[in-house]
Image: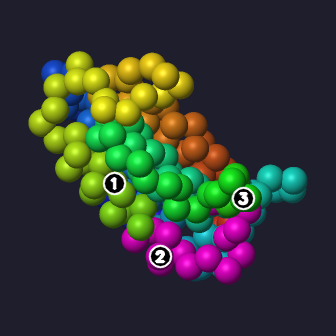
Amino acid sequence: MTDNRIDPPFVADEGPMLRSWLDWHRETLAVKCDGLSQDQLRLRSAEPSTMSLLGLVRHMTDVERHWFRNVLNGEDTPGIYWTDEHPDGEFDLVDTASAEEGLARWQAEITNSSELSAGLPLSLLGKGLRGGEEVSLRWILVHMISEYARHNGHADLIRERIDGATGE
């Protein structure tokens, strides 16, 4: 695994600190996927789970898309990998999915998320709602950090299962 992550600063203002931690967690998932074949990225964790590294990447693509496009920016974009018919499609439908496409789309959503939120105050309320409630950019960033942190734990276990590689 190639690890190009930059550690978040120990001292910084809140906005740069939150964005740095989010970037670090995004890169952590990329590190867990680095150097693996398409088949390895599709490998399921353990039955009955349908979780795989590619599934996690696809899930986080939809998560990035939802929180930054729909909630922060007020867009009405549908899920990419899940539908009403396949609510867990990002995980369940990876057997023939392209890992290259999944990774590229994830990176594109990260770029879009970063551009949409760049320079905005943390107290800014999103244009969309969550369960009828307003949501601040601060909340979205904290939520995204927690979402990545949880799934990076899953990714670490899946990567260890694939080739024994471990790491922070």
Q: Looking at the picture, which amino acid does disc 3 mark?
A: His
Residue 13 % position (x, y): 16, 21
Q: Rate crowding at label 1 as few (under 14), some (14 to 19) or many (20 or more) other CA atoms within 10 Å.
A: some
Q: Closer to the observer: label 3 or label 1?
A: 3
Residue 157 % position (x, y): 67, 50
Horizontal side of residue 117 vs 107, given as left or right: left
Q: Is residue 151 above or below residue 159?
A: above
> Which residues are the magenta region?
90-104
Q: Give the labeled residue for mark 2.
A: 101
Number of dots carrying numbers: 3
Horizontal side of residue 150 vs 162, given as left or right: left
Mark closer to the chain start, 3 or 1: 3
Closer to the camera in the image, 129 or 61: 129
Residue at 31% x, 32% y: name it. 127
Q: Does the magenta stretch include residue 34?
A: no
Residue at 28% x, 55% y: name it. 112
Q: Looking at the picture, which amino acid does disc 1 mark?
A: Ile
Q: Where residue 86 is drawn, which disc sits there?
A: 3
Residue 2 % position (x, y): 40, 65
Closer to the camera in the image, 146 or 158: 146
Q: Is the magenta stretch mostly helix, strand or loop?
A: helix
Mark closer to the chain start, 3 or 2: 3
Spatial distance from mark 2 to mark 1, Cα to Cα?
Answer: 14 Å
Residue 72 % position (x, y): 32, 36
Question: Furthest residue to the left?
Answer: 119
Q: Where residue 110 is drawn, which disc sits there?
A: 1
